[in-house]
Amino acid sequence: MKIKNLILTCLFFFAFCNIIRSQGTDLARIEYAYIPQADSDNVYSRIRVSANYPIKMGKEGTYFVIGTQYRYNNLDIQDALPFENRGDFNNFHTIQLELGYTFKMKNNWRFGAKLGAGISSNFEGSGLGNDDFRYTGSLYLVKSYNDKEAPKKSRLIVGLRYTVPASLNFPLPIINYFNRFHANWSYSVGTPKTNIKYFFNTKNTLQAFVGLDRFYGNLQNNRAFVDANGDAKLAENASMLNIMGALGYEYFFTEHLLFYAYGGYTLSNEIRLRDGDQENVFTINDKNTFYFRSGIKLKI
């Protein structure tokens, strides 16, 4: 278990670097994900809508960015649970707002900072509570290598990101490296998409990747139960962490508007109930399964 936890911790480290990279280039996105659970009737599905609006400031290369995101997470659990009161257990909503600021520095470096607040809850109670809110903050530096002939380019990102509440309650380092080393090839080191990509032409790309997908939501009405060992437990939130290997296809309608579809199989698949200290109190499903995600996005 210690080795497994170390691996998952490292994956989380790299996950946030990709969050910074993807949110920095996506202007808008609408997406659907579908993950049927193996050997059960459980299904996780998600609809995600996000948008980023950059506002140019007075100095060249300086921007104030407003980012917003909504996720409808459907956690359709048919397996037996250790408590009788399911309530509105399946439907979770995530709403998030982030404010960012970025400016150019010397030698092709760029500084960026973000502050965000959001709500992730099943909203089964009355009103909002403190446990429904999540807060994020991040600082990062981006180094672009502009001395290469187009379309070759590369980029390095380093920084820190902190989210509370989260299963890892400490700042996470951000490290990511992207390299378009050939007219037809690129690779990126970091998750949730460590990949290698092939460009057929300006409209069609294919990639192979190892990725990470996750979900976190508060249970407004906590569930108390006694586990198999006779210990009293309290489920206060639900979470999912998937690590998958997949193939992805992208079709560019224009230079900035594209359709994408990713399909593969999970290498690790865990849906858990956690207490207020983010300790696992019950594992709903941990069997590997198929994974599908598709959508349309507008990018810089």
Image (tube, grey):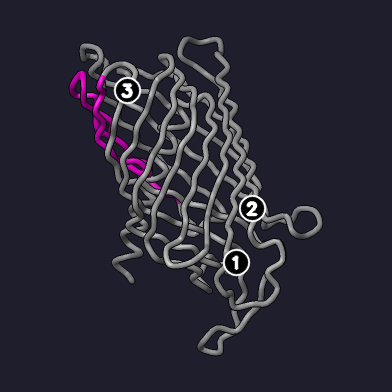
Seen at 39% across and 58% down, the residue is 289
Residue 276 bears which disc, if any? 1
CA distance for labels 1 and 3: 46 Å
Give the foreground label among 1 and 3.
Answer: 3
SS assignment at label 1: loop
Q: Which residue is mark 3?
A: 204
User: Where is the N terminus found, in terms of image quarters?
Assistant: bottom left
Seen at 38% across and 30% down, the residue is 141
Seen at 41% across and 35% down, the residue is 261
Q: Along the line of sight, which residue is nearer the eye, 54 or 77?
A: 77
Residue span colored magenta: 171-200
Residue 68 is drawn in which quadrant?
A: top right
Mark 1 vs 3, N-terminal side? 3
Q: Residues within 10 Å of mark 3 (few under 14, many from 20)?
A: some
Q: Along the line of sight, which residue is nearer the eye, 170 or 298?
A: 298
Q: Where residue 271 sits in the image (x, y, percent)? A: 49, 63
Mark 1 vs 2, N-terminal side? 2
Residue sitting farthest toward the bottom: 230
User: Where is the C terminus found, in terms of image quarters?
Assistant: top left
SS assignment at label 2: strand
CA distance for labels 1 and 2: 17 Å
